[in-house]
Amino acid sequence: MHGIIDQLRHTRLAKKLKQSELGHKSGLPQSHISKIEQGKADPRLSTVVDLARLLDQELVLVPRSMLPAIRAMLAGEEL
Amino acid sequence: MHGIIDQLRHTRLAKKLKQSELGHKSGLPQSHISKIEQGKADPRLSTVVDLARLLDQELVLVPRSMLPAIRAMLAGEEL
DNA sequence: GCATAATATATGCTATTACATATAATTTAC
DNA sequence: GTAAATTATATGTAATAGCATATATTATGC
């Protein structure tokens, strides 16, 4: 689970956004963003979807068997 | 958000699993599975990740720009 | 070093989820 | 049609997320 949260945090940093800015956009207090990013809160699915979208990301459900192919695709995009 | 939940429900049906079976595997009561599947509860991220894994699925965070490519890939897999 | 910026921690309250259990309603199979 | 299977709804409790606000701590920039 905290793989997704770590990725969200990584993306926030890459976009040079502060926790307080993301909090403001999402309606959550900066302190709660901090808790979520540190794995100290288990956020609701809707909260994670909202945060992801604010960072131009989407949560997708995929068959586990396709994970390698999808990861390869994402890795290629990063280059 | 309920796109993911709908997909989970669809996957459960495709695997011919009952709500009570999924509930038992996940430690959640069948009644709560029902609520989640109907969008009447906003489950925690960890709950959704657990349910997904029990159905051989994974939640993945992807750049929105890559959604079409990933969806195309997933569609290909279904054939 | 110091001021400022940013994040982490604390406290408190409300609403909701998670979970238990029971039962009502619907669907399925014969 | 009816019984059995399955899902939906109800009630209750405990734990926690969401949210507000404040402040402590750490990081950054000069």
Image: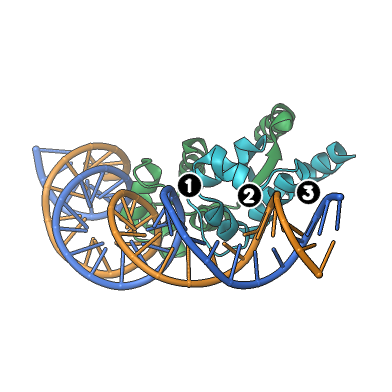
Chain colours: A cyan, B green, C orange, D blue
Kind of residue at disc 2: Gln
- Which image quarter is the C terminus of chain B in? top right
Which chain is indicated by disc 3?
A
Q: Horizontal placement of B6 versus C29: left or right? A: right
In front of the other: A20 or B76: A20
Q: Residue at x 46, y 63 (%)?
A: B25
Kind of residue at disc 1: Arg
Label 3 SS: helix
Mark number for residue A19? 2
Q: Are marks 1 and 3 in contact (CB under 8 Å)?
A: no
Give the labeled residue for mark 3.
A68
Q: Horizontal placement of A38 versus C10: left or right? A: right
Relative height, residue D17 to residue A21 (above, below): below
Residue D13: quarter of image: bottom left
Residue B50 image point, x, y percent: 53, 58
Which chain is indicated by disc 2?
A
Numbered-mark total: 3
Q: Horizontal placement of A79 versus C20: left or right? A: right
Q: Residue at x 59, y 63 (%)?
A: A39
Residue B34 image point, x, y percent: 34, 48
Give the labeled residue for mark 1.
B12
